Amino acid sequence: MKKSSLVAAIFLVATFINPLAFADGPQNSLNVNQVNSKDLMQGNDYYGIRTFQTTQKPDSILGWFQQNLPTVKNQYGESQKDPSKLGVSFSSELPMALLSSIRVFTSKVGESDSAINYLCSSIDDPTCSPKSGKFKSLRVDSVIGNCLRNPDSACVESISFALSDKSVVKAKPVIEIPAGTKTFAGQFDSEGKGFPPGLSSWIWEADVPGAPKSRFLARGTVTTYAQIDNNSLDFQRPTFNFELVPVTSEVAPVIAPRLENFKYKNSSDPVVRQVSIQPSCLAHDTNICYHRANFPQGARATVALQLPNRLTGWLNGRLVKPNVTATPMNTIYDRVIVEAAPSENIIAGGWVEWQKIPEKLFFNDDGTPNTMGVGRLDGAAGMYSGSVGAIEEYLDWQPYLGDKALLREEGWTFSSTTIDSTNPCSNQSGLQGVVAANASAYSPGAPAFNKETQTLDYKVAAPH
């Protein structure tokens, strides 16, 4: 295997100015041993949906876990997932289907999303009303769509590729995925606070020399939280993530994914589950399974997006030598153009015996479950590479995961930083720079300004 190096690079952005019953007791009182092997797939189990198993090599975290599933015999002599094992990962890939949604949580803004949460039928759903008193925060996931279909939204305007011979090919949107997804309108106040419409991802097609009709999945999400306080919603600044993935496909006996409300086993607490989880597929729709492919050799991609102008600070990316520009479009959206080559994405993780992991790794200092603790209740504990505390969490988990990378993928991804920065380089409004790294975990904010060396410092961590 070719040896890979851990890299991080910092670049500046050019900005141009122009009614439910709830169980009592803490949510971490659920029996982990009982729910560990089943809850993540609860939506599949409820409808009797069979999991498709591809013969191709895994190209996502869930795909790897599916093909390397530890099993034991149950009382009937049948094989089932070993409930003592927990899948753990640190990655920036988006392994689950991206589906627009409005949800409410019992956790506050700034805390790890609570395991207890409810899928709202709309922003006006009475159960999700601030006056209900049942929840403490609201989260809107607005999938980034296609500007040709929905121009007044967070969307992709254009995609093109500069090839190794200096020629440029343009892509066009050809397939909505999933087709006919339920969407919702955006909502902004006079100060620009609110959320963009919830749309669907699209597959784009380009005629690359030697590979006509090459297809690329363009998917991302703008996530906006609102604190529920004094019977009102206080919308915070949004964050976002986006990735461009070359794809191939195969016919498969699968149905389109969707979200539904369920109940935790052994409780009456609500929980949102995806129906039709297919780990073998990078993405899927009815009767089709998509897999990760390779970018054209030596190509650099240029993607133009419309994004809410309340996005500020720095971007994190799996990119090589990125160029980024941001230009105001109107009172709500900016045009953000990113041009870069794909980078290697080093994914850390594996199966661990969760009972041998120190309990402190699953809880915050106040005793509430952290991101990995909430994940343990679902049977899969994953952390986004740029999340707050990701480096510290990774270093704590590294002795149990080993030094070998779980997967290495070619990635073209970028996302907003998840915390505000106080250094002199980021005291302005708008997007100011991009940090490109291939690490499994990295700092969630902007680079720190080192007064002694007059340089920007940035922390990363990954296995070999």
Image (cartoon, rainbow, N blue to C red):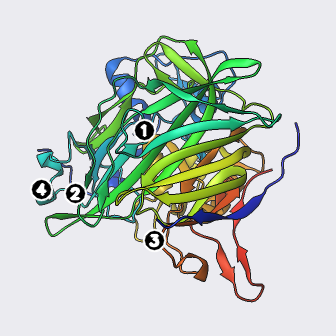
Residue located beneath label 1 in the image: 147
Q: How many labels does the image show?
A: 4
Q: Residues within 10 Å of mark 1 (few under 14, many from 20)?
A: some
- Badge number at residue 108: none
> Looking at the rendering, which quadrant does residue 1 occupy?
top right
Kindly identify the residue that appears in the image at 33 percent across and 19 percent down.
47
Report the side of 174 relative to 180 (left or right).
Answer: right
In three-dimensional space, the C-alpha distance between marks 1 and 2, rounded to whole angstroms, equals 34 Å
In three-dimensional space, the C-alpha distance between marks 4 and 3, rounded to whole angstroms, equals 29 Å
- Counting residues from the start of the chain, the first of labels 1 and 2 encountered is 2
Which residue ends up furthest to the right in the rendered image?
A: 2
Contact? badges 1 and 4 (CB < 8 Å):
no
Residue located beneath label 3 in the image: 365
Tell us which disc is closer to us: 4 or 3. Answer: 4
Contact? badges 4 and 2 (CB < 8 Å):
yes
- Counting residues from the start of the chain, the first of labels 1 and 3 encountered is 1
Tell which of 195 and 95 is nearer to you. 195
Tell us which disc is closer to us: 1 or 3. Answer: 1
Residue located beneath label 2 in the image: 135
The kind of residue tagged 4 is Ser
The kind of residue tagged 2 is Phe
- Badge number at residue 132: 4
Kindly identify the residue that appears in the image at 73 percent across and 55 percent down.
462
The kind of residue tagged 3 is Asp
Q: Position of residue 440 (x, y in %)?
A: 67, 52
Query: In terms of secondary structure, where does tag 1 sit?
Result: loop
